[in-house]
Image (tube, grey):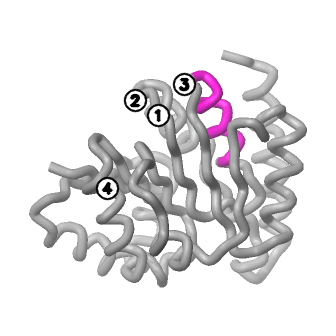
Amino acid sequence: MNKAFFSQLEHLYTTLKLEDEQKPNRLDRWRNLEPQSALLISMLIRGQQTKALLEIGTSNGYSTLWFADALKSTGGHLTTIEIEPQRTQLAQASLEKFGFLAHTTCLTIDAQEFLQHAEPKYDLIFLDAERAFYKNYWPDLRRLLIRTKGAVLVVDNVISHASEVLEFIQLIRKDDQMLLTTVDVGAGLLWVACV
């Protein structure tokens, strides 16, 4: 474990959180994944020996750094998508600074468009985007999960924004081929896998 790297991540999180506190408009904020959640997912990546991870919602790349570090140890690759070009560029700069560009593909694209054409190759999918669109994403997320043995979907903010993801979670619950549970860490993580 690289203590210097994790110390830099801790400093970065604190800095970005202070920035968010100064922004009244939610959409202008970074809205980063909490460190406890990032650590848990990075442990999953290492334990599962993830080879292909899809992150939907790059933001400034804070969570991307956690995932790229874990994937470096598994020999895996991260594809991260973001709709805002400036955020993609910021994430790429951070990845370059820490030496993770070789393990990462950063795309500026609408999630719906990407998912419709995505190949079922991801061992792990992390969803942290605009929650209003999650129900629209589900048919393609489901296709990716079903066609990739052992694949897991992790969704952030399911406790902190429970009302906004309620219908999405109910949709998954109705699916007999899916198992799901909520992990009470950070803002709440939903874990979904095929039966």
Q: Quadrant of residue 90?
A: bottom right
Of residues 53 and 25, which is closer to you in this image? 53
Name the image quarter holding the N terminus: top right
Q: Check disc 2 and report its element: helix, strand or loop.
A: helix
**Is 70 contained in the magenta span?**
yes
Which numbered disc covers residue 48?
Answer: 2
For residue 74, the mark is 3
Q: Which mark is residue 50?
A: 1
Give the residue displayed 47% in from the left and 82% down from the top: 133
Residue type, numbered disc 4: Leu
> Is label 1 in a helix, a strand or a loop?
loop
Magenta span: chief secondary structure:
helix
- Residue 49 drawn at (x, y percent): 45, 27
Please give the range of residues in magenta: 64-73
Give the mark nearer the N terminus: 3 vs 2.
Answer: 2
Q: Disc 1 vs disc 2: Cβ atoms closer than 8 Å?
A: yes
Marks 1/2: CA–CA distance: 5 Å
**Left or right for 120, reference 66:** left
Question: Image height check: is 54 above or below 9?
Answer: below
Q: Secondary structure at mark 3?
A: helix
**For the residue carrying disc 1, how many other residues have a C-alpha within 10 Å: few (<14), some (14-19), or many (20+)?**
many
Instruction: Look at label 3 and name its amino acid.
Output: Thr
Q: Which residue is mark 4?
A: 145
- Residue 97 occupies quadrant: top right
Query: Mark 4 or mark 3, which is nearer the start of the sequence?
Result: 3
Report if the CB atoms under discs 1 and 3 are less than 8 Å apart: yes
Label 4, secondary structure: give it. helix
